Structures are given as C-alpha cells and as structure tokens.
Image (spheres, helix red, strand yellow):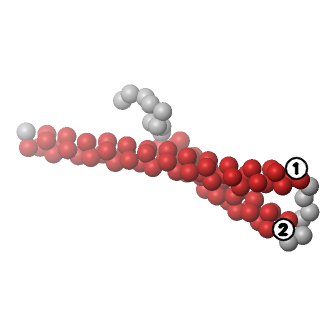
Amino acid sequence: MASGFLEFSREDSARLEEIRYELGKIGTNVNQIALAANRGRAPMVKAQWASVDELRRSLPMVAKALSQIIAERRRQGVALFRKFVEAQEGARHG
C-alpha cells in the first residue's frame, strides 16, 4: 500500500485519540484558570493573561485538526474494508 500523509498505524491512531482527549482536558483546565483569575482567586499579570488567551484560541484549532485527521483515517479504513468485502464477494461469485 502506498504511504501517504494520512496513512498511519492503529497504534498511531490510538495515540492521536489520546492526544485529542488530553487536549480537551487541558482546555478545560485553561478555562478554569481563566475563570478563577476573573473571580480574583488567581491573580495573573498581563503576560500570563496573554498566554492563557493564546491557549484558549489555539487548543480548539489543534483539537479540530486532530479530529479531521482521525475522521479521514477512519473513512479510509472503512473504504478499504468495503473494497476487501467486495473483492471477497467477487471471488465467491466469479
């Protein structure tokens, strides 16, 4: 099978799923930090706010990109499976 950008092993797929899950947890933590700071429970300097804001903007984009990669990989897997089934059915009838 030809190697391409979106072709990777099951282990890599599982790792990407784990990363996507962890990114979601990190995003939740970042939001909790911002909420605590807004309520005055965690004072932050301007540079820290800039970092939190950057994370809040970036994490969803990274998570979305990972989701798209994972969805494409699944789509490819389904297509390969269908092709295999069709070949098996053709071999039985031909």
The first of marks 1 and 2 along the sequence is 2
Element assignment for label 2? helix
Where does residue 91 sit, x and y in percent of width and height? 13, 39
Q: Residue at x 79, y 68 (%)?
A: 35
Type of amino acid at the residue the image marks with label 1: Ala
Q: Which label is found at residue 47?
A: 1
Quadrant where the N terminus sits is: top left
Which sits in the foreground, 79 or 62?
62
Q: Considering depth in this image, is 8 or 52 the residue closer to the camera?
A: 52
**In the image, what residue type sits under mark 2?**
Asn
- Badge number at residue 38: 2
Residue 46 at what x, y percent from top left?
89, 53
Drawn side of residue 21 relative to residue 54, left or right: left
Return the mark for residue 18. none
Q: Is residue 18 visible?
A: no
Q: In the rendered image, is residue 69 in sight?
A: yes
Q: Quadrant of the C terminus?
A: top left
Placement of 61 over or under 39, stated as above or below: above
- Above or below: residue 22 compared with residue 80: below
Q: Estimate the x, y position of residue 76 in percent, counting from the top left.
A: 37, 43
Q: Quadrant of residue 72?
A: top left
Q: Position of residue 54 (x, y in %)?
A: 75, 50
Number of residues whose C-alpha sits closer than 10 Å to that of mark 1, classed few (under 14), some (14–19) or many (20 or more): few
Instruction: Count the numbered circles shown.
Output: 2
**Horizontal relation, residue 56 to residue 2: left or right:** right
- Residue at left offset 63%, top offset 53%: 60
